Amino acid sequence: MGPPQNSGTILGMHIEWVRNVSNGSNASQLATLQNSLSVITLNDSEDAWVWTIDYPSFSVKNARCHIDRGLLPQDASTVWSCVFKWLDLQPPTVSSLNGLYSWIAGIHMSPTKRAILDVISGAVLWSLWSFRNETIFGTDHPKRNLLFDKIVDYSFRWYSSRCKLHFISWNNWIQNPLVVYSL
């Protein structure tokens, strides 16, 4: 394409400039724009939205699942596995939050330990949700390697502020908060 002119047709649109664009950065930018637009072809077909991820049609659920798979740490079950390893518990085989909380309610341990487990589970859910939101809406992407540390920190602070009768030190908490009450 030759040097830019004061008027011309791009993509079927007649463009006429008020001032002469013959040299300098404006001329260079106009030439770049004309070259970029020269390879585009438009047709008169009807516009359409096409969803090409997973399923043939769009749904909020499918979009959310796709986003969650891409944005949650590798797999949320990995986070839960780390938590259960920290607590020295065998991970339950549950498929829903109701199943998780039913498992907590039915596990054979003291009410204090159950309360700790309940708080930790809430901290895991909060941390995963917060991680997802920070990834989608935040200006800085959260660090996956800090996720477990946040769970430990949040759960300690939440338990300490909720249960004044049962003091537990930070050192005992980070080792395993369930072991302290078995001594």
Image: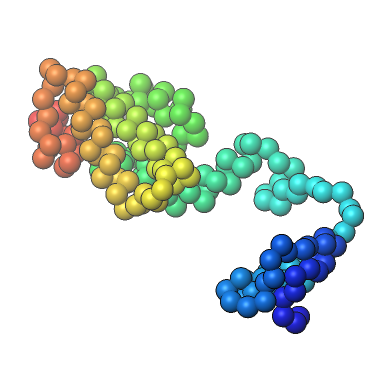
Q: Can residue 24 be seen by looking at this rendering?
A: yes
With 15 as the anchor, is 30 left or right in this view? left
Whole-percent x, y for residue 136 in the image = 48, 45
Q: Can residue 36 be seen by looking at this rendering?
A: no
Image quarter (top left, top right, bottom left or bottom right) of the C terminus = top left
In the rendered image of this protein, does residue 9 appear above or below residue 126? Answer: below
Whole-percent x, y for residue 51 in the image = 72, 48
Q: Nearer the viewer, residue 71 or 106?
A: 71
With 171 as the anchor, is 18 left or right in this view? right
In the rendered image of this protein, does residue 62 appear above or below residue 23? Answer: above
Q: Nearer the viewer, residue 180 or 153?
A: 153
Residue 114 occupies quadrant: top left
Residue 86 occupies quadrant: top left
With 83 as the anchor, is 17 left or right in this view? right
Q: Nearer the viewer, residue 79 or 30?
A: 30
With 47 as the anchor, is 136 left or right in this view? left
Residue 178 occupies quadrant: top left
Q: Residue at 37% across / 45% down in the picture?
A: 79
Q: Residue at 32% across / 46% down in the picture?
A: 147
In the rendered image of this protein, does residue 138 appear above or below residue 177? Answer: below
